[in-house]
Every structure is written in structure tokens, then in C-alpha cells.
Image (cartoon, helix red, strand yellow):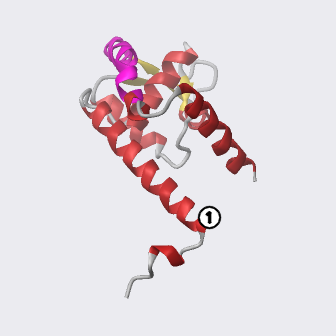
Amino acid sequence: MEKDLQEIPLRRKLGISMVETYNSVYEQSQEFFAKYGLTSQQYNVLSILYDAGTPLSTSAILKRMLEKNAGVSRLVDRLIAKDLVEKKVNPEDKRLIDVQLTGKGEVLYHEVFTALPDVDAVYKNLTDTEVELLMTLLSKIRES
């Protein structure tokens, strides 16, 4: 028999609500990126490489990623298969492999970047004040 929702402690309800919200937002963002043949993690790699303006090792990419658990090597391999990035031996340290955007990857990055306001629409029911308050509250949770 399932426990009545009223019996669940308030802070546990908050945790459940946060997970449900994350799942909903994540699902919608994945649908957005799928229109471009990407996942949000793959776009994150393209964005990191674009912002760096220079080739990066997979370990440098991982340090900058939003989702640290993502398998960077697999992500890079999938992006190579799509001709969006390429690997090259680091000229200064032959043991390192650098990853850089291809021309096709840079074009796709710009295309997705200009459409990002569409993915932000998931928060359209919140006012700017509410968004700022929510960000403050979430930060407060992370600091505890």
C-alpha cells in the first residue's frame, strides 16, 4: 500500500518535486537538441570547444562540463562520427589528444546557439523576479 502523500515530510516532498522538475526540464531540453541531431551533453562539448577558441584535451573538456558524469570520450567519438569535431595529436605533448570543432561543428553550434531562447521557454511561466528568487534558493540549497 502506497504511503499517503500527506505523510511524507515536507523537505522530502521538496526533493521529489525537484527531481520531477529536473526530469521535465531535461526531457524538454533533449527534445530541443534532438531537432539538431544532438543531445544536450553533445551541445555542451561543442559550446566548450567554441568558447575555448583553441583545441582542448578531453580532460580539459570534462573540467568545464556541466554534467561531470558524462563519458567525454564517448561524446567526442559520437561528435567525430557526425563530423562536428576532430581529434589531433597535441603538437607540444604527443601523449595528449586535442579535440577541436570542424567547420560543420562551428556552423551547427551557431545554429543551435541562436535558437537557445526556444529551450528557455520551459521557464516561461515564471516572472524574472521569480527566476531570480528560484536561483537564489537553489544556490542556498547547494551551499548547505
* Residue shown at 40% from the left, 38% from the top: 75
Q: 76 or 7, which lies in front?
A: 7
Residue 95 within the segment the image draws in magenta: no
Per the picture, the main secondary structure of the magenta-coloured stretch is helix
Whether residue 122 is situated above or below residue 89 in the rendered picture: below
Whether residue 111 is situated above or below residue 66 in the rendered picture: above
Disc 1 crowd rating (10 Å Cα; few below 14, some 14-19, many 20+) is: few
* For residue 78, side relative to residue 53 (left or right): left
Image coordinates of residue 136 in percent, x first then y, are: 67, 38
Image coordinates of residue 51 in percent, x first then y, are: 54, 17
* Residue shown at 44% from the left, 24% from the top: 46
Residue beneath disc 1: 11
Whether residue 45 is situated above or below residue 14 in the rendered picture: above
Q: 64 or 72, which lies in front?
A: 64
Q: Quadrant of residue 134?
A: top right
Q: In this view of the protein, can residue 48 be seen by the observer?
A: yes
Residue 117 within the segment the image draws in magenta: yes
Stretch of the chain drawn in magenta: 102-120
Q: Circle 1 sits in a helix, a strand or a loop, which is it?
A: helix
Q: Quadrant of the N terminus?
A: bottom left
Amino acid marked by disc 1: Arg
Residue lying at the far right in this picture: please name it. 144
Q: 4 or 82, which lies in front?
A: 4
* For residue 40, side relative to residue 48 (left or right): left
Image coordinates of residue 36 in percent, x first then y, are: 26, 26
* Residue shown at 36% from the left, 37% from the top: 29
Q: In this view of the protein, can residue 88 be seen by the observer?
A: no
Whether residue 119 is situated above or below residue 51 in the rendered picture: below
Image coordinates of residue 3 in percent, x first then y, are: 44, 82
